[in-house]
Amino acid sequence: MSQIKRKLKRVTEIVSNKKTQQFANLVRSYRKSYIGKGPEQVKVFFKDNWAVCHMSGSLSKVENFYLRNKDFESMLKYGRTEEIKELYKQNPPVEMEELVGAKFVKLFTDVNLEDDEVVSIFVFDRSIEE
């Protein structure tokens, strides 16, 4: 019986890893479609009704250029947080909803411009864990 449990656990891990990779790809393509540049790296994990994403390499060359001037920093931070939240409200991530089998509710996000890192928490209406 334990051999069957081990195999089942391994199959579950493979499915879960595939789902997190697909979700990461959807985050990247959504941002690329609506913002113009997707993150270079995306790490995802699911916890209850949250999909937590850590992204790096999201800033474009133009954004990095503007960061040379500290006056643009707050504007860029606002654009990378509040405007992104509004974008997801206006254009719900339907493909993400289909992948996880739950309805998107809201997005929490923050950016560290200096390190070019973003953490986003996608909140869904029910658990999305395997």
Image (spheres, rainbow, N blue to C red):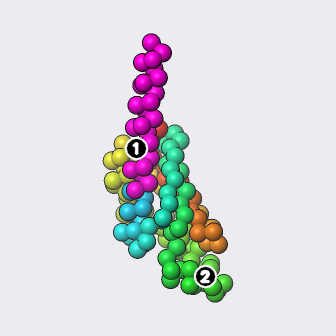
Can the viewer see residue 108 in this picture?
A: no
Would you call the spot at circle 1 few (<14 residues within 10 Å), some (14-19), or many (20 or more)? few
Seen in the picture, residue 93 relative to 39 is either above or below; the reply is above
Q: Mark 2 points at which residue?
A: 67
* Magenta part of the chain: 1-25
1 or 85: nearer the viewer: 1
Would you call the spot at circle 2 few (<14 residues within 10 Å), some (14-19), or many (20 or more)? some
Disc 2 on helix, strand or loop?
loop
At 38% from the left edge and 56% from the top edge, which residue is drawn?
A: 26
69 or 115: nearer the viewer: 115
Please, which residue is most extreme toward the front here? Answer: 3
Quadrant holding the N terminus: top left
Q: Position of residue 38 (x, y in %)?
A: 44, 67
At 44% from the left edge and 42% from the top edge, which residue is drawn?
A: 17
77 or 53: nearer the viewer: 53
Badge number at residue 71:
none
Q: Which amino acid does label 2 sit on?
A: Leu
At 40% from the left edge and 31% from the top edge, which residue is drawn?
A: 11
> Which of the 4 quarters of the picture holds residue 114?
bottom right
87 or 118: nearer the viewer: 118
- The answer to whether residue 78 is magenta is no
Of tags 1 and 2, which is closer to the observer? 1
Q: What residue type is labelled 1?
A: Lys
Can the viewer see residue 25 in this picture?
A: yes
Q: Where is residue 43 in the image (x, y as percent from the top left)?
A: 52, 53
Q: Where is residue 9 in the image (x, y as percent from the top left)?
A: 46, 27
Q: Name the residue under label 1.
A: 18
Q: Which of marks 1 and 2 is nearer the N terminus?
A: 1
Disc 1 on helix, strand or loop?
helix
- Marks 1 and 2 sit apart, C-alpha to C-alpha, by 36 Å
Q: Position of residue 45 (x, y in %)?
A: 52, 46
